[in-house]
Image (tube, grey):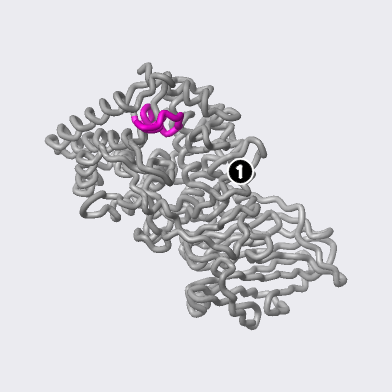
Amino acid sequence: MYGVVGNGETCAFISIFSSLDWLCLPRFDSPTMFARALDSVNGGSITLSREQAGTSTPFERGEQRYLEDTNLLETTSLVGADTARAIDFMPFGKHKLWRILGVSGPDNFKLVLDVDPRPDYNRSKPTINILDNGLMICSPGQALMITCSEKAVVKKKSITFDVQPPMTIPLLLTYGSTPEEARKAAASSNYEREYQADLKLWRNYTACAFPVFDLSPRMHYYYMRSLLVLKLLMYDRSGAILAAPTTSFPEIVGEDKNWDYRFCWVRDGAYSAEALALAGLFGDSRQIIDFLLSIVQPEGKPYPYPLVSIYGDLTGTEEEEVDTLAGFGNSRPVRIGNKAVDQKQNDLEGEVIHAIYTLNKYSGCAGYVEENFLAIERIVEHVAGHWREKDAGIWEFRRQYMDYVHSKTMCWAALEYGARLATLVDRRHLASKWGLEAEKVKVDIVKNGWSEKRKCFKRAYEDDAYDASVLAIPLMNMLPMEDPMVRMTIKSITDNLGTGGLLKRFAEEPNAFMLSSLWLAQVLMKRGKTVNALDIINRAARYASSDLGLFAEEYDMYYQRLVGNIPQSFSHEEFVKSINYLLGKE
């Protein structure tokens, strides 16, 4: 697996062998410059090797860790009889990546940096120019400059250093849309100063979170890592948060369920804003909600598109297949863009309203609700008039629209929590109107969404399949935990979708899904079954995260491996929420 570093604009994946195997430039959703994570032969990377007496030895037997409470990554590798320790970090808000290499051991040798750029998903040929002590790599709309203050022998695809341990070699990668931008980013660079500044920035961020007590050191690590990952996935200029920083890491290795997640899903953004509010990081929660409110459409459906670019428009969302990369584990096709952008998903408005409600509940800032009430009213009024319509549902099935129970439940949430927000700012007429409409939605769900045969709420009125998304009913408090239908639903979902102590989304899916697993943990906490809930949370942390604490979308119980795009905001934000619920919040 990989460690991930980022700067609020893009991110880089570093392997345990200190190779750089994923980097999109100049932003998260830009084309790749290096994509060996998706194709070990043709993806492109920056690798390190040791050369001695004419023999080249690749880095081997590596291990990684993050510096405590930061997104600065340390990779330690054995290089023959020597040890190489690399610190990778991307100064926040700057167009640069530092790779600080420290070498120790008994031998003198040559350290070779092999540079194999494959711009635009290996669809473009780069122009490479040799500089005084580095390289300038260019492709249309992309430029990457690699420089070092140490003396080196520079060739068109390699940079070689004579190493006399102990020795520190600071490598600087700067980037932009043009060579001029890459050169400008390199000006006045000082790795020691920027290292200390980045340490301070990340530690100040985590220090702003509410303290969490009564957690084991391991669980505390996963909790803080989740908060750091959520910040890492935010595009700082707009407040958008990515579903994941990668594309086409497969849900099932060797098959075609490979999707581009480098966009902001309205739903994911709302969930992440809730998690950050529960954690006390109100500024970041508000920044995400500000973004979500900024893209509300003035007419028609407030959120006609389930996902948008990090700029809030549809840039890059059109789906296409890339045939120049083999895909992770030969999982074809590699896709960029996401066809789900064309779907109608009726839960989105409710997700945003509930996120605003949660932020207000824990920040106590009623002024935010008042300032944004016109947008809130616009959202809830639309739901009041359109909740009966069919849609594609939360799982984005590419088939005929239906009356999904989860979507109906979130329409209820938009009306119910919208009414509470209206009461908060003394809009009593609207509160009464929306509350009455919410009751109509609930009656409709209970009447048409229940399967007496299965003793469970159905996936959709037209489909009585078991589906974990109906856990939204108790999670949103639409029905109380003591309601017999709720209790039977929890049992039926657990019995029929459980796998290895975790939960699948639906029967057709082979893998445990982190979002639904952690939803089940939260529901069990609401039922007072804390021990059972804690077991699920522990299993999620043990199975579905890498050694560094990066959570995947799913876990393949059969092959015991992480699958899906990683790190996944869905998984991290639900882990944060689960820990906060465990500590008494709801």
Residue 137: x and y in percent read 58, 76
- In the depicted structure, whether residue 238 falls above or below residue 205: below
Residue 287: x and y in percent read 35, 52
Q: What residue do we see at 52% from left, 78% from top?
A: 183
Quarter location, residue 240? bottom left
Q: What residue do we see at 57% from left, 37% from top?
A: 511
Question: Does any portion of residue 233 appear in the rendered image?
Answer: yes
Question: Between 359 and 21, which is closer to the camera in this rendering?
Answer: 21
- In the depicted structure, whether residue 316 falls above or below residue 414: below
Q: Is residue 559 left or right of residue 364?
A: right
Q: Residues within 10 Å of mark 1 (few under 14, many from 20)?
A: many
Question: Between 274 and 326, which is closer to the camera in this rendering?
Answer: 326
**Judging from the image, what secondary structure is the residue with disc 1 in?**
strand
Residue 203: x and y in percent read 51, 50
For the residue marked with disc 1, what is the amino acid? Leu
Chain part drawn in magenta: 459-476
- In the depicted structure, whether residue 225 falls above or below residue 116: above
User: Quadrant of the image for the C terminus?
Assistant: top left
Q: Is-magenta flag for residue 470? A: yes
Question: Does any portion of residue 187 appear in the rendered image?
Answer: no
Q: Is residue 545 left or right of residue 293?
A: right
Q: Is-magenta flag for residue 387? A: no
Residue 581: x and y in percent read 43, 31
Pointer 1: what residue? Answer: 562
Q: What residue do we see at 49% from left, 72% from top?
A: 176
Q: What residue do we see at 70% from left, 79% from top?
A: 154
Quarter location, residue 392? top left
